Image (spheres, rainbow, N blue to C red):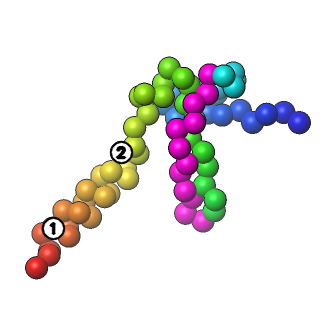
Amino acid sequence: MSAAVHICRHCDGPITDPDDSVYIGHEPGSSGPGWNIWAHREHAHLVGPDPDAIRILARVLIARALHSE
Protein backbone atom coordinates (compact mmCIF):
# COMPACT_ATOMS: atom_id res chain seq x y z
CA MET A 1 0.00 0.00 0.00
CA SER A 2 1.46 3.36 -0.97
CA ALA A 3 1.25 6.55 1.06
CA ALA A 4 -1.07 9.31 -0.11
CA VAL A 5 0.57 12.17 -1.97
CA HIS A 6 -0.37 15.52 -0.47
CA ILE A 7 -0.89 18.68 -2.53
CA CYS A 8 0.55 22.00 -1.40
CA ARG A 9 -2.17 24.58 -0.74
CA HIS A 10 0.14 27.43 -1.81
CA CYS A 11 1.66 26.16 -5.08
CA ASP A 12 -0.69 23.26 -5.95
CA GLY A 13 2.35 21.04 -6.44
CA PRO A 14 2.63 17.49 -5.12
CA ILE A 15 4.52 16.97 -1.87
CA THR A 16 6.50 13.82 -2.56
CA ASP A 17 8.78 13.90 0.51
CA PRO A 18 6.84 13.22 3.73
CA ASP A 19 9.43 15.18 5.74
CA ASP A 20 8.72 18.25 3.56
CA SER A 21 4.96 18.30 4.32
CA VAL A 22 3.38 20.53 6.97
CA TYR A 23 -0.17 19.99 8.18
CA ILE A 24 -1.96 23.35 7.97
CA GLY A 25 -5.44 22.40 9.15
CA HIS A 26 -8.74 20.75 8.30
CA GLU A 27 -11.26 22.17 5.86
CA PRO A 28 -14.80 20.88 6.48
CA GLY A 29 -16.83 19.68 3.51
CA SER A 30 -20.39 20.77 2.89
CA SER A 31 -21.69 17.24 2.47
CA GLY A 32 -18.93 15.04 3.83
CA PRO A 33 -16.04 14.77 6.23
CA GLY A 34 -13.83 17.37 4.53
CA TRP A 35 -10.08 17.14 3.97
CA ASN A 36 -6.74 17.99 5.49
CA ILE A 37 -4.72 20.92 4.15
CA TRP A 38 -0.99 20.46 3.55
CA ALA A 39 1.85 22.67 2.35
CA HIS A 40 5.53 22.39 1.57
CA ARG A 41 7.66 23.35 4.55
CA GLU A 42 8.92 26.50 2.79
CA HIS A 43 5.35 27.49 1.78
CA ALA A 44 3.63 26.97 5.15
CA HIS A 45 3.98 30.60 6.24
CA LEU A 46 2.50 31.78 2.92
CA VAL A 47 -0.81 29.91 3.30
CA GLY A 48 -3.58 32.20 4.49
CA PRO A 49 -7.32 31.91 4.96
CA ASP A 50 -9.55 31.38 1.95
CA PRO A 51 -10.13 34.85 0.42
CA ASP A 52 -13.63 33.92 -0.79
CA ALA A 53 -14.70 32.92 2.71
CA ILE A 54 -13.27 36.16 4.13
CA ARG A 55 -15.11 38.23 1.50
CA ILE A 56 -18.42 36.47 2.18
CA LEU A 57 -18.02 36.84 5.94
CA ALA A 58 -17.25 40.55 5.55
CA ARG A 59 -20.41 41.09 3.48
CA VAL A 60 -22.54 39.30 6.07
CA LEU A 61 -21.06 41.31 8.93
CA ILE A 62 -21.56 44.61 7.04
CA ALA A 63 -25.17 43.71 6.23
CA ARG A 64 -25.83 42.87 9.90
CA ALA A 65 -24.27 46.12 11.06
CA LEU A 66 -26.30 48.20 8.60
CA HIS A 67 -29.59 46.51 9.45
CA SER A 68 -29.23 46.14 13.21
CA GLU A 69 -31.50 48.17 15.42
Left of 28 or right of it: where is 46?
left
Which quadrant, please, contains the C terminus? bottom left
- Residue in the picture at 23% in, 63% down: 61
Q: Position of residue 59 (x, y in %)?
A: 25, 60
Among the 4 quarters of the image, the one containing residue 16: top right
Residue on which disc 1 sits: 65
For discs 1 and 2, the disc positioned in front in the rendered view: 1
Q: Along the line of sight, which residue is nearer the eye, 23 or 49?
A: 23
Which quadrant, please, contains the N terminus? top right
Identify which amino acid the numbered label 2 is placed on. Pro
Identify which amino acid the numbered label 1 is placed on. Ala
* Boundaries of the magenta span: 20-31
Q: Position of residue 51 (x, y in %)?
A: 36, 45
Instruction: Report helix, strand or loop for mark 1.
Output: helix
Residue on which disc 2 sits: 51
Residue 38 is inside the magenta segment: no
Inspect this view and state whether residue 15 appears. yes
Q: Is residue 25 above or below residue 3?
A: below
- Residue in the picture at 48% in, 24% down: 43
Q: Earlier in the sequence, mark 1 or mark 2?
A: 2
